[in-house]
Image: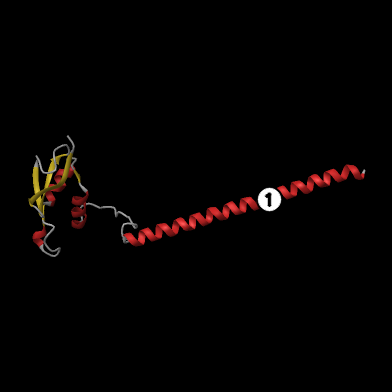
Amino acid sequence: MSLVIRLARAGTKKRPVYHIVVADSRSPRDGRFIERLGFFNPLMPKDKTERLKFDLEKAQAWMKKGAQPSDRVTRFLDAAGILKREKHNNPEKAIPRKERKAAREEALKVKEAGVAAAKTAATEKANEKAAADKAAKAAAAAAPAAS
């Protein structure tokens, strides 16, 4: 049985409150759970102590038994100093959509300009090679006639 420490939604429509629970990973989000470890109210200001109540000792005991915390619970444990959470990096998400689209279009233009320059260089190189081959043929044709 795979155990997970996760959030189970409670509260009313548009007024969520989450219970922090230990549950089987196969059970539904708001369904059966083994033990309730606390609650989280995201609507409260961050400086209020009533925003999060979490029994850290029980969480540590369940983690020793093999329970894996979800991403949000890992954030809580990281804030408490119990578990280290790696920072996620998605720099493109931080840029507003209009600026992302403009940057993508600009990058596409630069790429197209690079492709066009490469094509031009390739055709010039081919023309130079053809001219050199033509000159070599002309020299080869003139050399036997001179002998």
**Point 60% across, 54% down: residue:** 120
How many labels were placed on the picture? 1
Q: Position of residue 43 (x, y in %)?
A: 12, 59
Q: Position of residue 49 (x, y in %)?
A: 10, 62
The amino acid on which the numbered mark 1 sits, given as a three-letter code, is: Asn
Work out whether residue 132 or residue 27 is closer to the camera in this orientation and state it.
Answer: 132
- Along the horizontal axis of the image, is 61 left or right of 144? left
**Point 83% across, 47% down: residue:** 139
Q: Position of residue 146 (x, y in %)?
A: 91, 45
Q: Quadrant of residue 96?
A: bottom left
**Point 32% across, 59% down: residue:** 97
Q: Is residue 37 above or below residue 102?
A: above
In the rendered image, the quadrant that contains the N terminus is top left
Mark 1 Cα within 10 Å, few/some/many (few <14, many 20+)?
Answer: few
Work out whether residue 56 or residue 145 is closer to the camera in this orientation and state it.
Answer: 145
- Along the horizontal axis of the image, is 132 left or right of 46? right
- Along the horizontal axis of the image, is 29 left or right of 143? left
User: Mark 1 highlights which residue?
Assistant: 127
Q: Position of residue 3 (x, y in %)?
A: 17, 39
Q: Quadrant of residue 34?
A: top left
Question: Extreme bottom residue here?
Answer: 47
